[in-house]
Image (cartoon, rainbow, N blue to C red):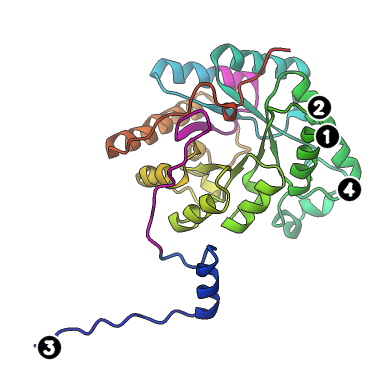
């Protein structure tokens, strides 16, 4: 019986792969996995982020259930757009988070779905292009929203457009927005590869919500391409976005992506615009507990984000 001869397969695009590899750039999905060795500046490897907390009622109920279960949360995301909330409700949400030492990140508007000058983006083709702003008035209104929210004590904003992120960075650099403001990109910005992540960091993003289905190799190279960027990675997704759950990968994700936010709980809904009721909140909280249980059982030595980290986006009193 003869032995099997081991012959390496010659990969396609070999010239490009060689140049990219030799210049420290992503070149393959088949690479050894490595821990990042990076923590948040004030300590810790991961935090917990819960999306679609779009009003005070949902915030209060979610926080109460988490506390009853003894589960941590780093920051909540409001995702419909703070322009749909009154000042009074925003202030109530900020106060509740501040009193409990958790973060609140508000989404900016107007986005194309609300902007009368962006009807193209509400059609079938336009909807697939993301939520790009296509007029100067919308930029000005978004800047005004950023001023409104930060003046009320908000220290975390979600943007849906690279140009908006660049604008917020310039406002922050000029001192018009607070120096400790964290700027976060939505998954609708479609950050799906390491080079795009680097571009977002260079233009002002402190956190990026990646596309939901990225493999471990891509995430590893994303971390290398932008070492100062917080990676916000969905661990489970809405039914309408595929409905997959990757809790078994959480130990690898925390090691590879650190510093990162585990974005947990979307799979409790079919669509992000679905109404949130008590059962939805209960399922979200259950997902948080389950996800962290997978991490704990793995034996990976990972520390929760420090209370001092500005990436927590805890509101300030004004």
Farthest bottom residue in view: 2
* Number of numbered discs visible in the structure rendering: 4
**SS under mark 2:** helix
| Residue 16, quarter of picture | bottom right
Give neighbour class at mark 4: few <14, some 14-19, many 20+ (Cα, 10 Å).
Answer: few
Name the quarter where the N terminus is drawn: bottom left
Residue at 54%, 69% (x, y): give it.
Answer: 20
The answer to which of marks 1 and 4 sits earlier in the sequence is 4
Which residue is label 2 attached to? Answer: 147
**SS under mark 1:** helix
Pointer 2 with pointer 1, Cβ within 8 A? yes
Which residue is label 3 attached to? Answer: 2
User: Percent x, y for residue 154?
Assistant: 70, 23
Q: Which mark is residue 135?
A: 4
**SS under mark 3:** loop
The answer to which of marks 2 and 4 sits earlier in the sequence is 4
Stretch of the chain drawn in magenta? 31-60
**Gap between marks 2 and 1, in whole Å?**
6 Å
Q: Which mark is residue 143?
A: 1
């Amino acid at each position: 019986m003869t032995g099997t001869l081991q012959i390496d397969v010659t990969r396609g695009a070999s010239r490009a792969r060689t140049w990219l590899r030799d210049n420290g750039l992503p070149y393959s999905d088949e690479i050894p996995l490595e821990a990042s060795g990076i923590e948040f500046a004030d300590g810790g490897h991961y935090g917990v982020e819960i999306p679609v907390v779009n009003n005070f009622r949902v915030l209060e109920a979610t926080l109460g259930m988490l506390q009853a279960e003894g589960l941590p949360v780093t920051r909540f995301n409001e995702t419909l757009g703070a322009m749909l909330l009154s000042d009074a409700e925003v202030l109530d949400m900020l106060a509740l988070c501040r009193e409990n030492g958790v973060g609140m990140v508000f989404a900016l508007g107007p986005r194309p779905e609300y902007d009368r000058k962006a009807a193209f983006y509400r059609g079938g083709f336009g909807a697939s292009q993301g939520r790009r702003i296509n007029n100067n008035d919308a930029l000005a209104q978004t800047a005004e929203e950023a001023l409104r929210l930060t003046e009320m004590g908000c220290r975390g904003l979600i943007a849906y457009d690279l140009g908006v992120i660049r604008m917020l960075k310039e406002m922050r650099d000029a001192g018009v927005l607070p120096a400790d403001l964290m700027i976060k990109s939505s998954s609708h910005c479609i950050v799906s590869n390491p080079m795009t992540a680097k571009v977002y960091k260079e233009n002002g993003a402190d956190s990026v919500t990646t596309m939901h289905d990225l493999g471990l190799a891509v995430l590893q190279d994303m971390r290398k391409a932008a070492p100062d960027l917080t990676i916000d990675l969905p661990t489970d997704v809405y039914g309408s976005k595929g409905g997959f759950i990757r809790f078994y990968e959480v130990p690898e994700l925390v090691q590879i992506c650190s510093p990162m936010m585990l974005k947990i709980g979307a799979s409790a809904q079919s669509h992000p615009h679905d109404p949130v009721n008590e059962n939805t909140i209960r399922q979200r909280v259950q997902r948080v507990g389950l996800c962290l249980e997978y991490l704990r059982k793995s034996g990976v030595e990972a520390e929760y984000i420090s209370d001092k980290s500005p990436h927590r986006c805890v509101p300030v009193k004004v």
